[in-house]
Structures are given as C-alpha cells and as structure tokens.
Amino acid sequence: MLEQLSLLSFANGGWGSALLAGALVTITLALACIPLGLPLGLLVALAARSKRRWLRTGATVFSTVFRGLPELLTLLIIYYGCQIAAQRMLAAMGYQGEVTINTFVAAMIAFSLVFAAFSSEVWLSAFKSLSKGQFEAATMLGLPKGTTLRKVVLPQLTRIALPGLSNNWLSLLKDTSLVSTISLVDLMRQTSLAVSVTKEPMLFYAVACFGYLFFSALSGRVFNFLERYFSRHQLSAKP
C-alpha cells in the first residue's frame, strides 16, 4: 500500500507533479473557453430572436450543428481542419513549410463553439421567462436598446440562466478529457501515461476521479455564490 502511494509523491519516481500539471491544463482549458463561448452563446441567442431572417437562420444552423455533432468529432475537425486550411492558404502564397496548430488553441476553439451552442439554448429559455413589460417600460423611459440589454435585461438573464449554465460548465469540464486524442497532456493523458508505466490502473484512475470530482464540487460552490449574488435584490425585497 505504501509503495503504491509513493507513486503519487512529488519526488523522483513519483507522478504527483505530472498529475498536478495535467489537472492545471484541464482547468485552464475549461476556463479559457468561457470568455469566448459564453458571449458567443448570448450573441447566438440574440440572433435567434432577431427580426432578420438570415440572423435567425444562422443561429439555428450554428446551434444545430454544434449541439448535434459529438464533441470529439468537433475537436478533430477543428484541429485537423485548421491545419489543412492554413497549409493550403500559405501554400497558395508560396510557403512550402509544414503548418501545425497549437493543440491547446484548437481545443479551446472547439469546446468554446460547443459551449456556445448549448449555452445559447439556456439564454433563449431565460429570454422567454422575462416579461415583455420590462422591455416596454424601458422603451417608455427612453432607454437605448444597448442600455436596456446591459442594465435591465442582462442581470436578470444571468440570474435565470445560471442553473443551466452550471450544467453546461460541468459538461465542458468533462469534455476536456477528450483532448488526449490530439496529444494535449491534460489530467486524463497524464493518468493514462502513469497507468501504462506503473501498471496500477485503479490507483491512478481513482486519483483522476478525485480530481474531476474536486473541480465539480468547487464549481458548485462558485455557482451557488453567483446565484446568491445575482438574486441579492430579490432576497432583500422579501419581508
């Protein structure tokens, strides 16, 4: 038992440092998708509500494609497709060298698109729960549409959408394990390497389970805090 636990040490011969580095890659990748995926999902939801038909059609196509494709297939298409496209574009300009796309960037783009597609549905549901009277009241007060969206609509949308967005975040966190297929060394990749070397699958897979459960539990605490923060005005208004 002690010999097995020594495999998790941070000293020479232990896998503690490698697993920790992989866990940092996992959480960093998931967090890096938020600044791109979350606003993009909101924009797709706004496009789906637009009076312009081409915007609604584009939003529907985007949501259908990236919600319908398996995440692994999206990842592989983005990773290899971007390399092929860049190679051909540069070849047309006379560059004959090999083009490689950073695996982290490719994974971030792929998962951001998937996260945006799923979060757009959450934003749309939140829009439907808002009363039309609020938009009419903002118009009567002479508020510009941008101010209405930013000051009146968005805070309420965020409060309503947070439970759904938390589910999307947990799915995103789990989907990051797929990046091992493009040789990005995340937690699952390091775990697989450790298992292949030490022949101790249960030990290292248990550590990986603990890592993902820890991130999930921590995420739950963060979302609980955010829900209380965006609901603070409602709580203060209760007698």
Image: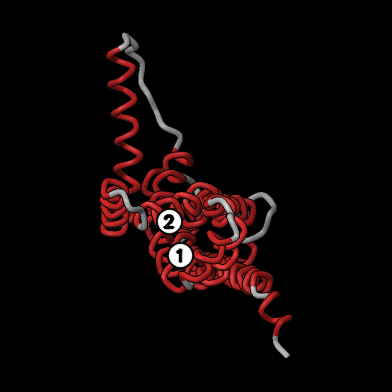
Q: Which of marks 1 and 2 is nearer the N terminus?
A: 2
List x then y, in percent, for residue 140.
Answer: 55, 61
Residue identifier under label 1 = 168
Q: Element at badge 2?
A: helix
Q: Which of 189 and 236 is in front in this view?
A: 236
Q: Which of 155 and 6 is in front in this view?
A: 155
Crowding at mark 2 (Cα within 10 Å: few <14, some 14-19, many 20+): many
Crowding at mark 1 (Cα within 10 Å: few <14, some 14-19, many 20+): some
Residue identifier under label 2 = 115
Taking the spot 48% from the left edge, 65% from the top edge, the residue there is 200
Taking the spot 26% from the left edge, 50% from the top edge, the residue there is 53
Where residue 218 sits, quadrant-wise, is: bottom right
Answer yes or no: is residue 182 visible: yes
Q: What residue type is labelled 1?
A: Asn
Name the residue at the bottom extreme.
239
The C terminus - image quarter: bottom right
Count of numbered circles on the image: 2
List x then y, in percent, for residue 161.
Answer: 50, 68
List x then y, in percent, for residue 28.
Answer: 58, 50
Judge from the rendering whether residue 178 lies leftward or rightward of residue 33; answer left or right: left
Display coloring: secondary structure
Q: Distance between the residues labelled 1 and 2?
A: 7 Å
Taking the spot 48% from the left edge, 41% from the top edge, the residue there is 104
Judge from the rendering whether residue 58 lies leftward or rightward of residue 123; answer left or right: left
Taking the spot 37% from the left edge, 52% from the top edge, the residue there is 47
Answer yes or no: is residue 72 visible: no
The N terminus - image quarter: bottom right
Q: Element at badge 1?
A: helix
Image marks 1 and 2: residues in contact by CB distance under 8 Å:
yes
Q: Is residue 136 above or below residue 91?
A: below
